Amino acid sequence: MNKIKLTDRIISTFEKEYPKVSVIVPTYHDWERLEKCLTALRKQNYPKERLEILIINNDPNDTPPINLYFNKNEFFLSEKKPGSYAARNKGLITATGSIIAFTDSDCIPEPDWIVNAVNKFIDNPEIKRIGGNIKLFYKEKKLTIAEKYEKIYAFRQKEYINTQGMAVTANMFSYSYLFEEIGYFNESLYSGGDSEWGRRAKKSGYNIHYFNDVTVYHPARSKLSELILKNRREAAGKLRVNKLKNIDFLLSIVIHILPPIKSIKIIDSREAKTTERILAFFIRYLLRINTALEYIRVGVFKNNAERK
C-alpha cells in the first residue's frame, strides 16, 4: 500500500487502495457542537470516497435541527439505549471501514487527523491501535476554576497509553477486526468503557501507540458541577468493572479519602502557575472524596450512576 501524501487536496489514481475509514461520533443533546465537529471532519485531507462518518444520536426523541444537513458519506443513526458506549456499538455494527476512528461531538479534529493516523498504521504494521493528542481549548482567556483543573489533569492520553494500554475515545483509532475478536464496548458503563475495552485489547496482545500529530481539540469543562458529575460516572464505572467486595471495597474507600499525594507528579509535569497547581490539587482531593461517596452510593445503596 502506498503511503498517503499530505497535500491541500489528495489526488491519486490509487484512491481505491486507501483503507476505508469509519468515523464514529456519538452525540447527546449537542447539535451545535456536533455541527462544528462535522465541519472539521468535512475538511479532512483524506479521499471522501474512502471515508464514512457515522453520527449516532443517543436520544431518538431529540431530533436534529432542520438546518443540520448530512453529506452522502455521512450517516445519521439512533440508539435508544442510554450511554455513549451503546451508541458507539451501534456505530460499530454499521461501520464498513477496515479502520475505525473515534471522536466526540464536542471535538474538533485537525484536517490531517485521519491521514496522519492512517500513515502511522501503514508505516508500522505492528501497530493495531492508536491514541492521539487531545488539546484543550477554553471559553475565555481567563480560565475558570474548573478549567484550571482540566488544564493540569484532563486527557493525559500519552500517560494512559504508556501505563494502561488504553486511549480515550475522544481520539482513538483501531482496526475494525479487533472488535470482532475481543468484543464491543461494555454498554452497562456510562464512563470508563474505553478504559475497560483498552485493557481487554492489551490483554489480547493488540498494542497501542501514542502520536502527537494525530490531534483533536476538546473543550475544557468550565463548571465544577460538570467535573463532579463526570467524576461520579467514572467512579460508578470503576466499581462495576473492578467488582470490589468486602475488604477491597472498604480499603478503596479509605484510600480515596486520603490526600492524592501521587498526583503531585502529574502537577509537576504540567506547565502551570503555582496558584493553579495548588488549586488543582485541592479540587483533586475533593473529587477523590466524591469518588468515595459514590462508591458508597452505588456499592452500598445500589443507586445507578447518572448519565449527565
Image (spheres, helix red, strand yellow):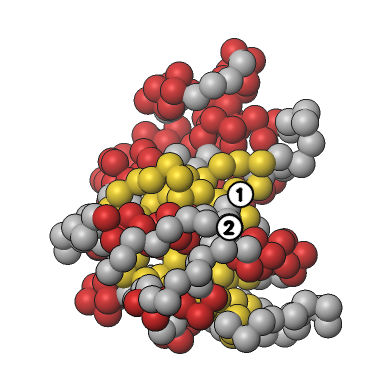
Q: Which of the pair 53/81 is nearer the observer?
A: 53
Left or right side of 114 for 107: right
Residue type pointed to by label 1: His
Task: Tell me the quadrant of the picture where the C terminus can be found.
Answer: bottom right
Query: How far from the left and from the top, in percent, is residue 192?
Result: 43, 57
Placement of 221 over or under 33, stated as above or below: above
Residue type pointed to by label 2: Asp
Placement of 177 over or under 102, stated as above or below: below
Is residue 45 visible in the rendered structure shown here? yes
Residue at image location 16% in from the left, 60% down from the top: 205
Residue at image location 63% in from the left, 68% down from the top: 42
State the residue position of label 2.
Answer: 8
Residue at image location 66% in from the left, 82% down from the top: 71
Residue at image location 43% in from the left, 58% down from the top: 5
Placement of 47 over or under 90, stated as above or below: above
The crowd level at tag 2 (other Cα within 10 Å; few <14, some 14-19, many 20+) is few
Residue 163 placement: quadrant:
top left
State the residue position of label 1.
Answer: 218
Left or right side of 222 for 111: left
Sequence-first disc among 1 and 2: 2
Query: How far from the left and from the top, in percent, is residue 269?
Result: 44, 23
The crowd level at tag 1 (other Cα within 10 Å; few <14, some 14-19, many 20+) is many
Q: In 3D space, how far apart are the residues under numbered discs 1 and 2 (Cα atoms)?
A: 24 Å
Depth check, mark 1 against mark 2: the one in front is: 2
Q: Which of the pair 287/220 is nearer the observer?
A: 220
Does dot 1 land on a helix, a strand or a loop? strand
Left or right side of 264 for 178: left
Q: How many marks?
A: 2
Left or right side of 289 for 146: right
